Image (cartoon, rainbow, N blue to C red):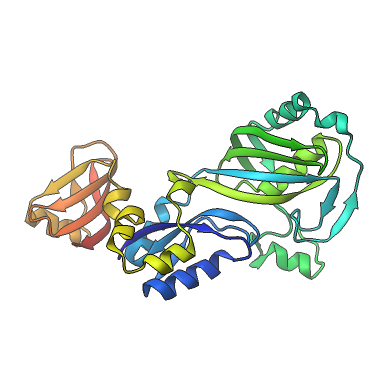
Amino acid sequence: MNGILIVNKPAGYTSHDIVAKVKKICHEKVGHTGTLDPMATGVLPLLIGEGTKLSGYLTQHDKTYEAVIQLGKQTDTADGEGKVIQEKEVNLQNLEIENVQKVLQSFLGKQIQKPPIYSAIKIHGKKLYEYARNNEKVEIPEKIIEIFHIELVEINTNNQTISFRVHCSKGTYIRTLCEDISKKLDTVGYMKHLKRIQVGGFSIKQAVSLEQIEKEKDNPKFWNQYFITFEKFFSDYPLMILENRKFTLFLNGVLLKEDREDGIYQVRDTSQRYYAIGTIENGQLKRKIVLPN
């Protein structure tokens, strides 16, 4: 079993928790890409078996989220799990649809963002949240992120919440975005709910629950429908057939001259016994991944 399974992560579990549970069910090595906070739900791609070799092809994916901001209160973790450190009145006039839409649209494009102190980014070998828990001061590096699309979903003036959907670059912290949106609405706020609905080409529609995996673990139809094999994952890339001698050299890591465009290629031998992935750079074919059929 080698490939990717998209899990719909429930709230209350770390990404590591989900990996451990699926590993126990499938009896395979399992990894993950695109970590989700424990309170967050939604798309969590799991790499199963030799699928862990695909991690390098997934780390740069953009993402789409649905989020809810709780206005009027700020927490130390920027989400609902922290303690309230500030409260500020919410001017309901600022929650008129036109104004909220204008504020959201102001975040489109590239911008500098500072990650929250309660995050897993490492500074000098230690995670930021470890500094926070020890009340240690540390300089948090800013990073460039990009918002490709952002739209208003709902305004609830009674609960003083705003729901929105955002398509953003890798590394964007939605908790920070929620705080920044709140500031532009002349108040404070924190991320109340977060659901990831897209990671690159992986959608929430493809995602399965832990209960489904447990129930259908021995059902071939389930795996045929939801499991993303190497062949499925690379299906849009061109196929290259190498004669056996040349393919043996390729398997052994020898760089081969190929007069083709630079890029990623599916590579097979004439007997179709192997499935491989190679890349061409400056006219040279290089082995990346090899799987026996």
Is the residue 6 above or below the residue 211 in the image?
above
Q: Nearer the viewer, residue 34 or 130?
A: 34
Q: Position of residue 232 (x, y in %)?
A: 29, 49
Can residue 114 be seen?
no
Residue 26: name its quadrant: bottom left
Q: Position of residue 77 (x, y in %)?
A: 76, 58
- What residue sits 24% from the left and 60% below the top? 290
- 30 lies left or right of 162: left
- 219 lies left or right of 8: left
- 159 lies left or right of 227: right
Q: Quadrant of the C terminus?
A: bottom left
Q: Quadrant of the N terminus?
A: bottom left
- What residue sits 66% from the left and 38% below the top? 164
Q: Position of residue 28 (x, y in %)?
A: 36, 72
Can residue 63 be seen?
yes
Q: Position of residue 107 (x, y in %)?
A: 68, 33
Q: Nearer the viewer, residue 159 or 105?
A: 159
- What residue sits 81% from the left and 37% below the top? 157
Count how many numbered circles sit on residues in the image: 0
Is the residue 266 above or below the residue 216 in the image?
above
Residue 117: name its quadrant: bottom right
Q: Nearer the viewer, residue 207 or 84?
A: 207
- 22 lies left or right of 12: left
- What residue sits 17% from the left and 59% below the top? 274
